[in-house]
Image (cartoon, helix red, strand yellow):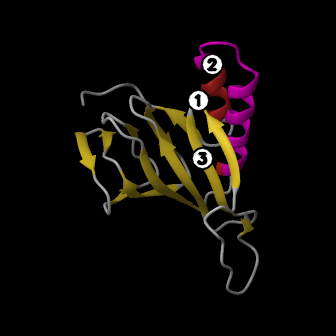
Amino acid sequence: MLDAVTRGVALLPAETGEVLDIFGLGLVVKVEPHTGGLFVAEHQVPPGLGVPLHVHDADDEVFVIRSGSLTLLGPEGGHVARPGDTVLLPRGVAHGFRNDGDTPVSMQVMLTPGTGAAAMFRALHRATRSAGPGGPAPAEIGAICAAHGVRFAPPTES
């Protein structure tokens, strides 16, 4: 993993990164900002899994779909992103996603400035590992996310 405050050109081989499990969604942290800048991770979304509508208060988010098809959820309804598509998710806009397909979705995720993203994902990873069957309670998940500037939005039609 690369600390974004490093200066100069850096090459991160494909196998580089911190591997986290967030409720069965694989995440590999590639770049982590400590003083602002950019958070980058590789994200794997198995069929049937996803993240409900939520809002990032301080981060803009970008997905680049590498393989599979991802159903995007938002205030205006659902869209499907396919390999090669780039998804822009501005801060303050409710969004979510799920894999409605039969194959895993692989995507790159970037958040800017992303200063709390790695800490939030690590806390969710710890909660996932320590929870019993069924995973952490929704209140625990909500509290972890809220502590890092992410709040769950009320459901909308999709």
In the picture, the disc for residue 135 is 2
Q: CA distance from mark 2 to mark 1?
A: 7 Å
Residue at x-position 30% and y-position 36%: 101
Q: What amino acid is found at the position of numbered circle 2 in the picture? A: Gly
Magenta region includes residue 94: no
First of labels 2, 1 by sequence position? 1
Residue at x-position 68% and y-position 80%: 10
Q: On the rendered structure, is 30 left or right of 101? A: right
Contact between labelled residues 1 and 2, with CB atoms less than 8 Å apart: yes
In the picture, the disc for residue 23 is 1
In the picture, the disc for residue 27 is 3
Which x, y percent locates residue 79? 24, 44
Badge 2 density bin: few <14, some 14–19, many ≥20, Cα 10 Å: some
Secondary structure at numbered mark 1: loop
Q: CA distance from mark 3 to mark 2?
A: 17 Å
Secondary structure at numbered mark 3: strand
Quarter holding the C terminus? top left
